[in-house]
Structures are given as structure tokens and as C-alpha cells.
Amino acid sequence: MEIIERSLCTWWWGTTECDFHFKPSDGRSGDIITIWDNKELCVKERIVKDHYIWLKGEWVRSKVITDTNINFKQISEQERKELVEEFSEEEIRKAVWDCDNSKIRDPDDVNFGFLKELWCDVKADFKRVLEKFHKHGRIVRGENSSFIVLIPKKKNPTKLENF
């Protein structure tokens, strides 16, 4: 059996310099040769090459673009600075005000109309969360929609005192 395995390995990959095993057909996927190769990139390239030849009939290596005369559209220095600046309070407010008042993810969520009405009370918290996001590149653990729970005292609350 090892001679068959080595010959199949040589036929398919051109080398027996790898660890392998032969799995007889189990009726679902047919005969499978599993290869573990230290030169993984070479194996992957060979598989891609063989598949491409099977589809197209010939192998043409991709050409790397070396033309340095390509002029990509560039952003201005001011735009570059704006991309790395922290969010201003006005930008945060504008983003909240651009959202539809009645949209919510599920019945227990607070809609943006409610947030707009309470903006004076919650804007500092929004700013703090976004400052941490800017610093860490992610919302800090524990500061998500499930962290704060408002339990309404009345049906269809519209003001903070209704909670």
C-alpha cells in the first residue's frame, strides 16, 4: 500500500518529501490523499496551477503591475487629518439626528427619538464611548447595548422620568 501511496504522491505533487496517508473510498468522497507539507505554499501553488490548467488548458502566471505612472485619486492633507481626529460632539449629534426616530432592533430597545429627546443627558456618555472606541479601535468590553437596561414605569415611555 505504501508504494501506491508514494506513487500517487509523486504523480500528483511531484515529490514524496512530505507526510501523507491514503484513505480508501468510504462511499461519500472517493479516494482521498491527505498531504501535510512543510512547504505549504508550494503545495497550494501547485494545486491552484493544476486546477487552472484543468479549467483553462494552460498556465499563465499573473503579472505584477510595475507601472509607476498610475495616478490614484488622493485625499487632501486636511482630509487625512480628519480621518484620524477624534469624533467631535457635533459629528456625534449629527449622526444621531440622521437616524430615523422610530427604528429599533427589537421591542425592548430604545429608539432614536427617545435619545434625541434626552440628548442633553446622554451626549457625554456617547462622547466617552466614542473616545474609547477611537483610542482602542473597538467598543470596550462591557459597553454595549445589553449593559444599560431601562425598565419603563408606564406603557410607551417618552421621557426619562417614565423609567
Image (spheres, grey):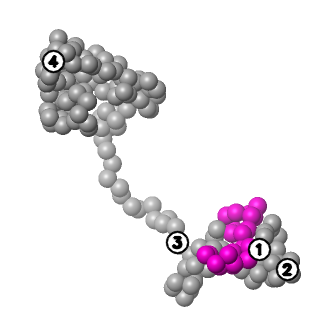
Q: CA distance from mark 4 to mark 1?
A: 69 Å
Could you tell me the amino acid type at mark 2? Met
Tell me if residue 117 can be seen: no
| Relative side of 96 to 32, left or right | left
Position above or below: 67 against 32: above
| Image quarter hosting the N terminus | bottom right
Q: CA distance from mark 1 to mark 3?
A: 37 Å
Determine the image quadrant of residue 71: bottom left
Could you tell me the amino acid type at mark 1? Phe
Position above or below: 107 against 69: above
Labelled disc at residue 154: 4
| Mark 4 vs 1: CB contact within 8 A | no
Magenta segment includes 112: no
Q: What residue does disc 2 label?
A: 1
Residue at the limit of the structure toward the bottom, as seen here: 57
Labelled disc at residue 91: none
First in residue order: circle 1 vs circle 3: 1
Determine the image quadrant of residue 140: top left
Look at discs 3 and 4 and give the one toward the viewer. 4
**Considering the numbered disc 4 on the image, is that residue within a helix, a strand or a loop?**
loop
| Relative side of 141 to 147, left or right | right
**Where residue 103 appears, x then y in whole percent?**
18, 37
Q: What residue does disc 3 label?
A: 63
* Mark 4 neighbour class, 10 Å CA radius: few under 14, some 14 to 19, many 20 or more: few
* Mark 1 neighbour class, 10 Å CA radius: few under 14, some 14 to 19, many 20 or more: some
- The residue at 77%/77% (across/down) is 9
Q: Which residues are magenta?
A: 23-43
Number of labelled discs?
4
**Where residue 16 appears, x then y in whole percent?**
82, 74
Q: What residue does disc 1 label?
A: 22
